[in-house]
Structure formats: structure tokens, C-alpha cells
Image (cartoon, rainbow, N blue to C red):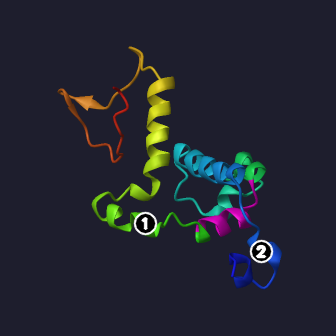
Amino acid sequence: MGPEENYSRERDANLTNLHEIKALLGIIYFLGVMKANKMNTDDAWARYSTGFELCRIAMSENRFRFLLRVICFDDKATRNERLQDKLAAVRLILDTFVKNCQKHYSPSEYTLRDIENGTPRNSGQKIMQISG
């Protein structure tokens, strides 16, 4: 029994592919960068004022919502590992992202860091250190 059998219309549960998953992750990342990660999807996909053209170009709002609703990183073989590592389900993606950041990003003397008296200030954001 495939996932398509849970839906009344076959087109409502089209299988995804790597290209679409990358688009999904790209939209999520983009919305975070734009500080719109808590924005209603209706507003993010709006054609006027609050909307982002990138979201509309990458995929439909309905497909975005569907993928967020059904995507699952669960692997029975790694459940015990995830008890110790809360990011185990996405560890491969996260590690690849961090390695790419280290490889392609070089902070300069003009890079701004939120530090006061030699101690990082709490600005409400968690930033992972990417320097080697």
C-alpha cells in the first residue's frame, strides 16, 4: 500500500524527488533568512505586498503545505540513536551544510559579531560556529 492510496485523488499525493526536496528546503531556508519563518503561508505566497516571488516560482503553496505535512525523517534503524542525538534525523543534511559553509565562506575583518566585553550577547538567535 503506497502513500497515494490514502488520498481520494492520485494527483493529491504525487511522489516527490530530490529536486523538489531541495526546493522545499530552499524555501524554508529563504523564509528563515527573510525572518518570515513564522509567516502564514498565505502571506508568503501572496502575489502582492507580503508575498515572495521565489516561493511562488519554486512550488505551489498547496504542494509546500502538503510536503511539510507528510515529510518524515523517521528511520526505525536509527530511533535509538536519536534518543541521544536530537538532530540525528537530519544530521547528514546538517553536517553537509556546515561543511559547505566552512568550505565556501571566509569571514573578513568586516564581519559583524554580536559580542560585548569579549562575551557573545544573547540576541535571541542561535548561531552555530562554522570556523574550523
Q: Residue tagged by mark 1?
A: 77
Which element is circle 2 on? Answer: helix
Q: Position of residue 96 (x, y in %)?
A: 48, 39
Q: Position of residue 33 (x, y in %)?
A: 53, 43
Which element is circle 1 on? Answer: helix
Residue at 52%, 59% in the rendered image: 38
Is 78 placed above or below 130 here?
A: below
Q: Residues within 10 Å of mark 1 (few under 14, many from 20)?
A: few
Residue at 59%, 51% in the rendered image: 25
| Magenta span dominant secondary structure | helix
* Residue range highlighted in magenta: 59-68
Which mark, by number, is residue 68?
none
> Which callout, 2 or 1, points at the residue further toward the start of the chain?
2
Q: Residues within 10 Å of mark 2 (few under 14, many from 20)?
A: few
Q: CA distance from mark 2 to mark 1?
A: 29 Å
Which mark, by number, is residue 12?
2
Identify which amino acid the numbered label 2 is placed on.
Asp
Q: Magenta includes 67?
A: yes
Identify which amino acid the numbered label 1 is placed on.
Ala
- Quarter in which the C terminus is drawn: top left
Q: Position of residue 49 (x, y in %)?
A: 71, 51
Q: Position of residue 83 (x, y in %)?
A: 30, 65
Residue at 60%, 63% in the rendered image: 40
Residue at 74%, 73% in the rendered image: 13
